[in-house]
Image (tube, rainbow, N blue to C red):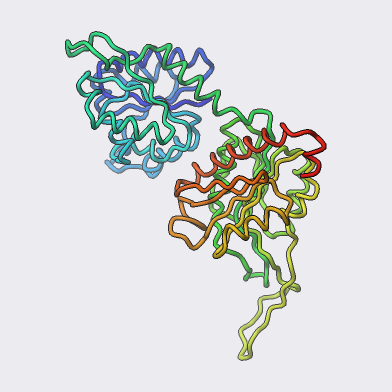
Amino acid sequence: MRITLGVTGGMAAYKSAELVRRLQDDGHSIQVVMTRAAREFISPLTFAALSGQRVITDLFTNEPGGSASLESAIDHIAVAQRTDLLLVAPATADILAKFARGVADDFLSTLYLACTAPVVVAPAMNVNMWQHAATQENASALRKRGVCVVEPSEGYLACGMVGAGRLAELDAILQAVRETVNAQQDLRGESVLVTAGPTCEDIDPVRFLTNRSSGKMGYAIAIAAARRGARVVLVSGPTALAIPEGVERVDVRSAEEMLRAVRNKFAGSTIAIFAAAVADYRVAAPATHKIKRGAEPFTLKLEPNPDILATMAKEKGDRMVIGFAAETDNVAENARKKLAQKNADLIVANDVGAQGAGFDTETNIVTLFSRDGRDLPLARMSKSDVAQRILDEALRLRGVMRSKPASQRAGD
């Protein structure tokens, strides 16, 4: 597993060197990120020698001549995408405040906002700073977002005081990392098929019909499933998104191409999630040459595209099949109807007209409608967090369905 270790300023920074070794003993690859203050306590060269990787110390790395490279300007995104877990030890009061309040003024705080992987922080500071209401509120806010906070231990502090504030023992930090890793591997052994993005239906060689889907929701699901241990195949319509690391991507263009690709991969899947915004209609007879402008009205004859979700759900067997419903009105009614008509196990529905939801946004607001009658409305959250909740609900529902007698499951 690829772990990014954030080291912030404090006397406990020297303990992070031993932490690198211990994490390597567990089989992890370590990339170290140091804040400016951390470099006052320990040298980046120490971590480079231990980890065998370059140590990131600045948001912008100046090139000869004094200019920052484009690569350094977006390095935090690249690191975030390849990180399986972000661990910050020691974590100062300052970095806890930045994480909690969304301040991004250095590499580590910017990386945190860009990172969708699990996060573990191990605070270390003066006892009064740790017990201060502001620090406690920040730690509480992080816990509510799913960050694992390894409580500092009690003892003599560098300032001469006695109390809670010492960096937790390395065994405790390692245990938190192991538990977080294990908790995130609940899809190991699963094969997850995901569709994402729009489809394009050609009118002529230069024009086509499509929709506003960016593919971000489907890609977030693929990334989350891969990080939770699944083998993931992503069948993607045209998008500007990079291929997620550890994911097999199959590129398609039209709805018919997507159906063929899905059919080819469906038999090897255990969970199929149809997040793509597939065009409902295609041009009946696309022109072989560019259609010229004319003075008369122009009419396109459209014919229905295949319903990929309904088609594959007929063949689902024991697979978990999940569909999406992008609605503009009567969201709940339409979602429940789709759940039944398509023979799906779970429908993820949203009002695409709602602010902070729908196409080409970083967040989403959805309700999960499950086969067992449960409706789970979710507040607005990042698409990465929505992806995790969808996978959580899929596993919960699978447990419910498997607990039923075979005869009852067959009748559902």
Q: Residue at x 41, y 17 (%)?
A: 173
**Residue farthest toward the left in the current orientation of the protein:** 160
The part of the image, by quadrant, that contains residue 400 is top right
Q: Position of residue 14 (x, y in %)?
A: 31, 14
As drawn, 152 above or below 358: above
Q: Position of residue 34 (x, y in %)?
A: 33, 26
- Position of 3 with respect to 206 (left or right) is left
Along the line of sight, which residue is nearer the eye, 400 or 21? 400
**Residue farthest toward the top in the current orientation of the protein:** 156
Q: Residue at x 32, y 17 (%)?
A: 152
Q: Position of residue 27 (x, y in %)?
A: 54, 17
- Position of 256 with respect to 102 (left or right) is right
The part of the image, by quadrant, that contains residue 125 is top left
Q: Position of residue 252 (x, y in %)?
A: 68, 54
Along the line of sight, which residue is nearer the eye, 182 or 409? 409
As drawn, 50 above or below 319: above
As drawn, 377 above or below 230: below
- Position of 50 with respect to 100 (left or right) is right
As drawn, 258 above or below 225: below
